[in-house]
Image (cartoon, rainbow, N blue to C red):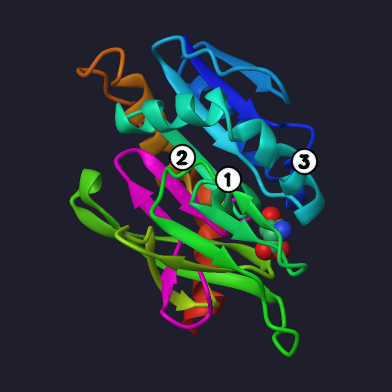
Amino acid sequence: MLTIHHLYADMMNLYGDRGNVISIRKRCEWRGIPVDVVDVGLGERVRPTGCDLFLFGGGQDREQALLADDLSGSKGADLRAIVDDGGVILGVCGGYQLMGHHYETPEGEKLPGVGIFDLHTEPRKPDEARLIGNVLVDVPAPEAREERRIVGFENHGGRTYLGDCKPLGRVVSGFGNNGGDATEGARRLNAYGTYLHGSLLPKNPWLTDQLILSALRRADDTIELEPLEDSVERSAFASMAGRLSGK
Ligand code: GLN
């Protein structure tokens, strides 16, 4: 049984990031893999089962401020330990920002992050616009021994700067972490951070399966995933990727 831990499901679900839960659940069910979804709200601790996938969606500054305090105690320490042990987590936008050291709001408030990634996020300057639009990213995927691409939609004011931390990928089209260094997201062990909403996973089935396989192999490292008939997902990806790469 794969357990999807949906962090702050009712608060951090901007631009339909709940679609990431649906995509993982369906790609497991289509393969006969039992899935349970657990919402982890304010004041609730994460309770790993041994075969887990953690999702942390996007949210406005107001929601981020509400849950930064909740993350600053044992819950944040639990999540750091899970990642250090190779646990699988995907953070999107506001959730991604809080996986770093801090997220500074436009009002100058520094919201503490969990410290999973060595990164921080600064507010946009008064004369800077929010970073909004469709995004195409080249992602080194060592698991697949090749470079893959992902598409999505970004809408964030924050500018994220990586320290000693690998990006998830390189921006082909769009802004990415800060609109300046061509990095997008972050990756450490099986922790993934990205600005890509969409939601991200339905149009990027290879990444969905990579997350599922990594989670399942924590319980049984011999597991393989049977291929799915996902021509619809792939054509959705190709349509956007083609538009963004000018092909
Ligand atoms: N509040 C954060 C920002 O604007 C993240 C927004 C989001 O999750 N889309 O940068």
Tag 3: residue type? Answer: Leu
C-alpha separation, residue under disc 1 versus residue under disc 2: 8 Å
Residue 63 quadrant? top right
Q: Position of residue 61 (x, y in %)?
A: 76, 55
Helix, strand or loop: magenta stretch: loop
> Any atom of ligand 1 within 8 Å of the CB at mark 2?
no
Callout 1 amino acid: Pro
**Which numbered disc, 3 or 2, marks the residue that appears first in the sequence?**
3
For label 1, being within 8 Å of ligand 1 is answered no
Q: Nearer the viewer, residue 120 or 33?
A: 120
Marks 1/2 in contact by CB < 8 Å: the verdict is yes
Could you classify mark 3 by the number of other residues whose Cα lies within 10 Å: few (under 14), some (14-19), or many (20 or more)?
Answer: few
Q: Say what amino acid the circle numbered 2 marks.
A: Thr
Q: Which mark is residue 202?
A: 1
Circle nearer the viewer, 3 or 1: 3
Q: Nearer the viewer, residue 208 or 116?
A: 116
Residue underneath mark 3: 66
Magenta stretch encompasses residue 186: yes
The magenta span reads 177-200
For marks 3 and 1 on the same chain, the one whose residue lies earlier in the sequence: 3
- Relative height, residue 128 to residue 17 (above, below): below
At a point 69% along the width and 70% down the height, the residue shown is 157
CB contact under 8 Å: marks 3 and 2: no
> Would you say 113 lies left or right of 15 here?
left
The disc label shown at residue 70, or none: none
Residue at 52% over, 59% down: 237
**Within 10 angstroms of label 1, few (less than 14), some, or many (20 or more) residues?**
many
Residue 91 percent location from the top left of the image: 54, 45
Determine whether 79 is above or below 160 in the image.
Answer: above
Residue 208: numbered disc: 2
- Circle 2: element type: helix
Q: CA distance from mark 3 to mark 1?
A: 29 Å
